[in-house]
């Protein structure tokens, strides 16, 4: 215990319990629950407050109130008044905080990660808005349109629609029946008085848990919490509890959704299961992993490998009341939804009728524990997991999760599967798109997770060693002693730039690297990575093929050996190439009904020529290219560009530089290839005049708007930071930047509006503005954007905007390196872009030295909306 008994008594707090470095206290005066998790490896803190109220606490007529109130909690309070320029966003932005909130069925949480010196600010905000929120009519009116926009975006997403309809049909009596965002008429009709009543019912310290993790002293943090929250009384009434229970289902239920769209059919199946606290719950978690964890999973083998599905998953709802076990996926072109449903049900029957092999079960358990080691080593992930534990049971449930998972037996799996996975307990849904027509699509990079790195007073340049290995690999190493984990990130010069006219070649080659090598089949590779508790995937972009992984220190030698085999000796099996082409073709088709995807590709086609790196082919042409790719072409591309001289690798973690270098020389010294390929981007001319393109799409509830021009800006340019800060002031975030302040906060026309340089690595990428609006609001939104841009061009940004954005940019950079994987990927990017680790050491000075004159000059140079192409995608036919 880190807090003395004397201090506890003086603060009137009680120590409750502790486990694995997590300490629980209670503020005696008002019942506030407190969790503290000290971790001094990075100068960052994460705070979160969790209220035990979610959509399950709502009723007919005011569904969506929890979510709407979550939005309103970012409006004015007594202390933080946005009307006076001191709102929550106004003070968190210059602190460089990464902050947000979310609502689920069982809880609402508000969280932020920021440099440690801002801990008091974060606690002050949460304490003030706990009881001092101003629910103003004008704020509710503008935010209503924002929430409606969010609702409409969801209505365009077939997956969201399926999940919503599944819950609505599977639950008839329990409030899990209605969606978290609420039914549309409830959201639009809920009176402000109802929101006030909801706030006054649930937002009290005795219904909340405050969590702090990161670089702080527990005594100091506890004192701050008491000073900020101690004067708030507990609720004057008992917190209402949910007493409704869902009766047993007595027969299968089915539904079909039909919408006009160009995408692929989908299937979803749900089974009622017990709540998270039930003794059988962890058996479902094991079955979820057996069914859907990686390429070797049962559903992948049964459906994706056989060409029945292009993507499939399983999800086990971790709920306070009985929830659902959900399986869903996309039907492959040429396959039938009924075939996919039958395949899913066959795998569930197999779980009930055939004992899982002990080796397969042991692999799941090893993977689960290895994954926990990595997941829990990142303070943001840890706090989020504790939050979900608090919502479902309590935080100790998370701490004990692995032990309960390990206790699941083969017999438990068969018994539980037989008890719950039967027809009378089943709800099935299909999504059937109508009138398909191919358009455009694009791939998105995978998300990554990571562990922490140590904080030190040394500069990055001092801590990072740079070596060129004997075969030409550039290796960066930054030791982080004691972390227990090792992160690795890499970039290989390859990508769309190096295959002009063949947009899919680099992407397919990257994806194929993990589909078989000399030592591993695709399934064996997936199983080995699962056992290590890590992942490995390659993604090709415009200029590089990227990869990043994190694992326990003891796994790193084996991982480098595996990485070497995958990089150097991929086998590119023809059957795997055929399967990947089919999957990617289906994925492209499934995205063709998304207005945002269609709009972005139309914009790229209007700004660039086919030979330019930022040009995007139509969906039909991308599919045609995929089908034309040969194995010989992929092998040749790999041989030409996936070479050691083109490869940059960064390692951050609990190993010293000589150990890392020895491992890479051991496993990769035999890899040979040609010289480093230069990255040269041809200049792109600005459009001669502004123009507008309307893209009709039937049955869409929102329109995506893009406004863009090519920008020659690149990361190494002297005016990069000036341009970056000017763009951030205009539209980095939806809430506090200029565009958001007008279109969302003042007029409530959009859920989100942003502007950005889409890829300022080596120049010529588009600078663009993007928003999603209701079709009836599109013209007004465009007019308001024009007004904001005219004002900016005329008067420029202010000293305060510049200072706020410099503070935010620096803080976000620090937060982004709060774990070892973040450090590894950042160092890799800086080296790849030619600015090196020293750019991180001088980042604060380079940001804060930008003058208003420099920012305005960059703004007028690059933000050429007078010559921009405007695309409206989703306009009604």
Image: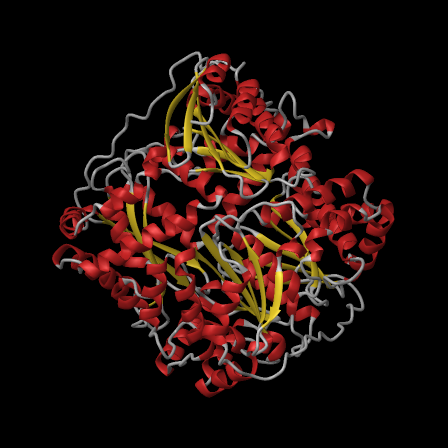
Q: Is residue 876 visible?
A: no
Residue 590 is drawn in which quadrant? bottom left
Vertical relation: 437 (above or below) 808: below
Q: Residue at x 41, y 33 (%)?
A: 22
62 to the left or right of 801: left
- Whether residue 738 sits left or right of residue 411 in the image: it is right
Q: Position of residue 770 (x, y in %)?
A: 64, 54
Residue 307 in the image, given as x and y percentages of width and height: 32, 72
Which residue extends farthest front? Answer: 658
Q: Position of residue 397 (x, y in %)?
A: 32, 36
Q: Nearer the viewer, residue 504 or 770?
A: 504
Q: Nearer the viewer, residue 386 or 798?
A: 386
Quadrant for the C terminus in the image: bottom right
Question: How many discs mark residues in the rendered view?
Answer: 0
Left or right placement of residue 689 versus residue 546 in this view? right
* Residue 313 visible, this orientation: yes
> Which corner quadrant of the image does residue 685 belong to?
bottom right
Assign the N terminus to one quadrant of the image. top left
**Extreme-bottom residue of the structure:** 632
Up-down relation of residue 235 to residue 745 (above or below): above
Q: Position of residue 253 (x, y in %)?
A: 24, 48
- Residue for point 54% across, 21% down: 223
Residue 150 horizontal side relative to residue 359, left or right? right
User: Quick one: 523 or 266, which is closer to the camera?
Assistant: 523
Q: Quadrant of residue 277?
A: top left
């Amino acid at each position: 215990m880190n807090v003395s008994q004397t201090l506890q008594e003086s603060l009137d707090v009680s120590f409750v319990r502790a486990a694995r470095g997590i300490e629980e206290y209670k503020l005696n005066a008002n019942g506030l629950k407190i969790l503290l998790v000290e971790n001094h490896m990075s100068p960052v803190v994460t705070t979160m407050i969790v209220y035990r109220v979610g959509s399950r606490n709502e009723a007919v007529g005011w569904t969506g109130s929890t979510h709407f109130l979550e939005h309103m909690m970012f409006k004015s309070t007594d202390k933080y008044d946005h009307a006076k320029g001191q709102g929550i966003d106004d003070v968190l932005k210059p602190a460089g905080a990464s902050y947000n909130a979310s609502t689920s069925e069982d809880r609402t949480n508000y969280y932020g990660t920021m440099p440690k010196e801002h801990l008091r600010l974060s606690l002050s905000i949460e304490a003030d808005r706990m009881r001092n929120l101003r629910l103003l009519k004008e704020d509710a009116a503008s935010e209503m349109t924002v929430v409606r926009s969010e609702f409409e975006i969801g209505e365009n997403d077939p997956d969201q629609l399926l999940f919503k309809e599944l819950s609505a049909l599977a639950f008839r009596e329990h409030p899990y029946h209605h969606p978290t965002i609420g039914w549309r008429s409830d959201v639009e009709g809920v009176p402000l008085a109802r929101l006030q009543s909801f706030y006054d019912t649930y937002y009290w310290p005795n219904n909340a848990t405050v969590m702090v993790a990161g670089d702080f002293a527990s005594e100091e943090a506890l004192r701050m919490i008491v000073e900020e929250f101690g004067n708030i009384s507990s609720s004057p009434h008992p917190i209402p509890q949910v007493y409704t229970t869902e009766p047993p289902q007595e027969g299968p239920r089915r539904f079909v959704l039909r919408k006009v769209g160009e995408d692929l059919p989908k299937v979803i199946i749900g089974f009622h299961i017990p709540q998270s606290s039930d003794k059988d719950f962890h058996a479902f978690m094991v079955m979820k992993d057996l069914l859907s964890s990686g390429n070797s999973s049962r559903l992948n083998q049964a459906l994706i490998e056989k060409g029945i599905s292009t993507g499939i998953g399983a999800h086990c709802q971790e709920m306070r009341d009985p929830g659902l076990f959900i399986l869903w996926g996309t039907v492959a072109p040429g396959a039938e939804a009924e075939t996919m449903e039958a395949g899913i049900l066959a795998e569930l029957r197999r779980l009930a009728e055939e004992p899982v092999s002990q080796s397969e079960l042991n692999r799941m358990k090893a993977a689960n524990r290895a994954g926990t080691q990595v997941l829990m080593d990142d303070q943001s992930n840890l706090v989020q997991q504790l939050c979900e534990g608090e919502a479902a049971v309590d935080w100790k449930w998370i701490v004990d999760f692995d032990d309960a998972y390990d206790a699941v037996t083969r017999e438990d799996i068969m018994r539980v599967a037989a008890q719950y996975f039967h027809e009378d307990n089943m709800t099935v849904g299909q999504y059937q798109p109508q009138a398909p027509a191919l358009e455009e699509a694009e791939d998105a990079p995978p998300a990554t997770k990571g562990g922490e790195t140590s904080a030190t007073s040394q500069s990055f340049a001092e801590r990072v060693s740079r070596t060129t290995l004997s075969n030409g690999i550039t290796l960066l190493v930054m030791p982080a002693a004691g972390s227990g984990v090792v992160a690795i990130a890499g970039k290989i010069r390859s990508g769309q730039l190096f295959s002009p006219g063949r947009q899919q070649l680099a992407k397919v080659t990257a994806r194929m690297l993990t589909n078989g090598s000399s030592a591993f089949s695709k399934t064996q590779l997936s199983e080995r990575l699962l056992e290590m508790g890590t992942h490995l995937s390659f993604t090709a972009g415009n200029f590089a093929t990227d990869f990043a992984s994190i694992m326990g220190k003891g796994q790193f030698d084996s991982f480098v050996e595996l990485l070497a085999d995958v990089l150097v000796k991929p086998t590119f099996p023809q059957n795997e190439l055929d399967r990947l082409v089919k999957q990617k073709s289906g994925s492209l088709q499934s995205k063709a009904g998304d207005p945002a995807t269609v709009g972005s590709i139309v914009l790229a086609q209007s700004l660039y020529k086919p030979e330019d790196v930022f040009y995007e082919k139509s969906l039909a042409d991308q599919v045609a290219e995929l089908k034309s790719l040969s194995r010989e072409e992929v092998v040749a591309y790999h041989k030409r560009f996936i070479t050691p001289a083109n490869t940059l690798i960064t390692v951050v973690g609990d190993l010293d530089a000589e150990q890392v270098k020895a491992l890479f020389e051991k496993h990769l010294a035999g890899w040979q290839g040609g010289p480093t390929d230069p990255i040269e981007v041809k200049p792109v001319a600005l459009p001669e005049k502004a123009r507008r393109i309307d893209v009709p799409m039937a049955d869409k509830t929102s329109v995506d708007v893009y406004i863009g021009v090519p920008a020659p800006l690149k990361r190494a340019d002297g005016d990069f930071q000036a341009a970056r800060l000017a763009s951030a002031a205009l539209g980095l975030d939806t809430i506090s930047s200029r565009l958001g302040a007008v279109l969302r906060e003042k007029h409530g026309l959009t859920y989100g509006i942003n502007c950005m340089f889409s890829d300022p690595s080596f120049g010529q990428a588009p600078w663009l503005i993007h928003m999603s609006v209701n079709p009836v609001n599109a013209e007004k939104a465009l007019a308001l954007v024009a007004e904001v841009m005219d004002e900016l061009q005329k008067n420029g940004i202010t000293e305060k905007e510049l200072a706020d954005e410099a503070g935010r940019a620096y803080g976000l950079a620090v937060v982004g390196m709060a774990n070892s994987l973040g450090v590894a990927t950042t160092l890799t990017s800086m080296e790849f872009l030619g600015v090196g680790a020293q750019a991180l050491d001088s980042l604060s000075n380079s940001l804060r030295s930008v003058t208003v004159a420099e920012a305005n000059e960059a703004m007028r140079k690059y933000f050429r909306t007078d010559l921009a192409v405007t695309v409206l995608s989703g306009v009604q036919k």
